[in-house]
Image: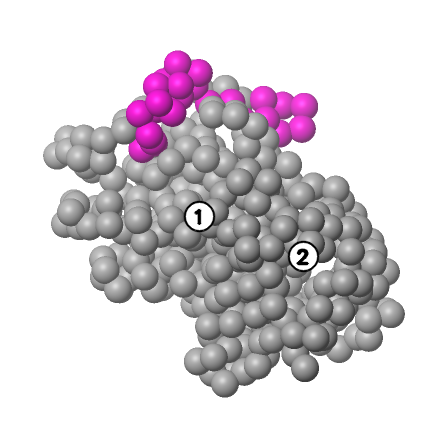
Amino acid sequence: MGELSLLSIGAGAIGSYIGGRLLLSGQQVVFLEKPEIAERLKQAGLTIHKGSESHRINSLQVTSSLQQALSAKNAYDVLLVAVKAYDTHNLIETLLPFKEQLPPILSLQNGVENEPLFRSVFGQDRVIAGTVTSAIGWKQVGEIVIEKERGIGIALDQKLARKLIDVLAQSGFNVKGYPRADPMKWSKLITNQLTNATCAILNMPPAAVLSHPASFQLEMLQIRETLNVMDALKIQVVDLPATPVRILTWAIRKLPLWINQPLFVYFIGKGRGNKMPSLFLDLRAGKKQSEVEYLNGAVVRFGEKTGVATPLNQFLYQTLMDIVQERIPRNTYEHNPDKLLEDYRSFIK
């Protein structure tokens, strides 16, 4: 088996999933965390649940000092970044003083703007784009649940990518390489948009959003706008690990709502069911930032650059940010897709 030494920024759901699985296969992993979390991880270790099986790692290498982590005795192959997209700028400021000591960065973040930011600061050949399609639940510090294992995508445009794919595959991951980063990241953006902003705005689970005619119409329209932007950028849709994005987007482009709705309710709603998505969870946690800025907001920004109209993405982005920042009450659209659709129609007049 190939060897890989990894420094993970944080031990959240994705960091613990990747780092924990690598540790179980004998790779070297160090977690960088806040002091209080670092102490808890040292004491509790890491437990990974999957179905009826659980794997526990009792001894973890955890530090709260980046300088210590990057000391001369530690040589890492990869720096794993899986923080929220709204934390990227602050992370770059933290990493910048150690620019010359940093290994290549593997970004597994949501959105399409993180890797370009990292490249602009740390160099074009120092950043590897990736994506995780597995659904990972975070129970508490040092404990995660693999809710639905799908896989990992890695862009092949950096020389370390092949080794990374080999080691991840040997560690039990379903890994797929992609010649270019943009198709992979934009295709993941589409899956991140589906039943995300609408669920947060409406305070409704994915299955309910897809089952209501008004909110289903909004779901289809927002993805059509994203596809129009991708067309303008000449970025193709690609399938992701265990995630058939191409057939999904073909249906959204080609089939009428009355055919699509029962299909989406069955295939997407059944898979996501009553599990609330990330934008809702951040809203419920009282966070004053939201990744909608880097999902629907990114579609709006690239739409402006390419001259493609994205009014629904603008409306969903603006509405959710208004709720997050308490400019409008959280219950404005609660369980009311008809009002959301009506207000969108007023918005575009």
Quarter where residue 255 is shown: bottom right
201 drawn magenta: no
Residue designated by label 2 = 198
Residue 25 drawn at (x, y percent)? 43, 30
Residue designated by label 1 = 84
**Neighbourhood count class around disc 2 (C-alpha, 10 Å): few under 14, some 14–19, many 20 upward:** many
Please state which of the two labelled residues, at mark 2 or mark 1, is closer to the viewer.
Answer: 2
Residue 24 in view of the camera: yes
Q: Which of marks 2 and 1 is nearer the N terminus?
A: 1
Residue at the farthest bottom position: 307
51 drawn magenta: yes
Residue 126 drawn at (x, y percent)? 26, 57
Please provide the residue range marked out in magenta: 31-54
Residue 164 in view of the camera: no
Q: In which quarter of the image is the C terminus?
A: bottom right
Identity, as a three-letter code, of the amino acid under mark 1: Lys
